[in-house]
Amino acid sequence: MNSNIANPAQAQGENRLDPGQLAEKILAGHRITESEALGILATPDSATMPLICAAGILRRQHFGNTVKVNYLVNLKSGLCPEDCTYCSQRLGSTAEILKYTWLKPDEAVAQAGFGIAGGASRVCMVASGKGPTDRDVDRVATMVEQLKDEHPQVEVCACLGILKDGQAARLKDAGADAYNHNLNTSESLYPEICTSHSYQDRVKTVEQAQSAGLSSCSGLIVGLGETPEQLVEAIFALRDLGSESIPVNFLMPFDGTPMQGTWLLTPMACLRILALVRMACPDKELRIAGGREMHLRSLQSTALEAANSIFLGDYLTSEGQGAAKDLQMIADAGFVVLGQESSSPSEVARRLQDAAHAAPPAPAEEERAGGCGSGCGTGCAPAQSGAAGCGAAAGREPVLRRRGAGTMEGPNA
Ligand code: SF4
């Protein structure tokens, strides 16, 4: 087996996988083997569309034509003492991301409201750092309670890093539904992407969340240099861990991090990876996460045939596709937003934009970003203006987020 994710050794003749037959076997209860998983990754580009169609059989069996929309609120950005090589918030990163300390509860809940107006049925409250103090957990618990009071129908997922004893239970008591902590990659590759904590630390946190009754959300970053075997190892670890929700991030190689300039994926390779996760974990939420715009490019909507979940709008430190465009993409591909089945995604997009235009600017402290310092070279326009500038997020390089949480600009809505 060739070790390149984007150009794997291709199975020939009788050894070539029949994806439709494999999907039928999985529907009947088969768990895919390592050899089948490697065969999926070895599918040539010319046979990748039939593979995605086969993954779609499983997706539609378990999730119909719904797309779950999730919304990120970055509660605390940058200033992390950990050394994860892929992360723009890591120790020593010179990426010019927004850096700010904890949002106030009112601000966090107001930011969440934008995503909820756009059809988000889950809000992900994220903070940088190795893990929270008990005081941090109390602070986030207050936010969760306030968010649940105002939007009881919305699921809340916390993502605060490595947990200590009792912290998952505190979040659960406050009303949190889920906890996110990604395994990110295989155990065998982990020491190469992070030295300040271990793979086992990550597994333990997922297990602590599960033990406290929180739904586990744990997924991947692909394109880190993993071999096909390591990718299969990581996906099977998530399967064994029982992750209920699996975000798949495609590496965004931020300038100023050790992964700067690392481009190892193609749109077709991304589709094969999503098809593999679907076939390995057929009934789990599969979320296309960060980097989808730059790596899937024109195949973003095709990827929804395997995945049933996306993040709306921006990511933690970088811009995503415009939220209204996300919703239009869902509609164009014949899907509906989960929980909004009676509204067309275009109507949901209109509501989202109305909410953004009606909102007062978020309170911001002096040290938070006031205006654009991104140096993106196109000139900055407020997100609502529709003008070209930082809002495009259509190019190859990550565009740093300069709006939404921690800024005086409206969010990507
Ligand atoms: S991934 Fe999390 S723990 Fe690692 S550097 Fe980034 S913010 Fe810190």
Image: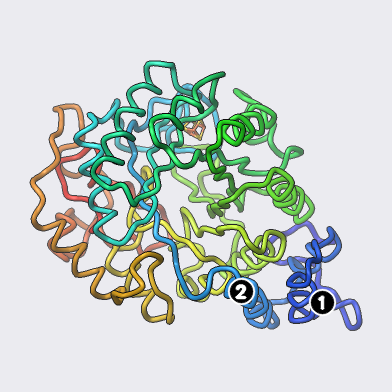
Question: Are the two marked residues, 2 and 1, in contact with CB atoms closer than 8 angstroms?
Answer: no
Q: Secondary structure at mark 1?
A: loop
Q: Residue 248: in sight, yes or no?
A: yes
In the rendering, at what x and y percent does residue 135 appear?
A: 37, 16
Q: Amino acid at mark 2?
A: Gln
Quarter containing the N terminus = bottom right
Rounded to the nearest angstrom, the CA distance separating label 2 from label 1 is 21 Å
- In the image, 69 versus 385, the foreground residue is 69
Q: Residue at 35% across / 28% down in the picture?
A: 140
As drawn, is 366 to the left or to the right of 281?
left
Color encoding of the figure: rainbow
- In the image, 261 versus 278, the foreground residue is 278
- Residue 17 tag number: 1
As drawn, is 179 to the left or to the right of 35?
left
In the rendering, at what x and y percent does residue 225 appear?
A: 67, 49
Q: Which residue is mark 2?
A: 61
In the rendering, at what x and y percent does residue 250 appear?
A: 54, 55
Disc 2: CA contacts within 10 A as few (<14), some (14-19) or many (>=20): few
As drawn, is 91 to the left or to the right of 152?
right
- Residue 267 tag number: none
Q: Amino acid at mark 1?
A: Leu
- In the image, 17 versus 120, the foreground residue is 120
As drawn, is 197 to the left or to the right of 389?
right
* Residue 405, above or below 54: above
Q: Secondary structure at mark 2?
A: helix
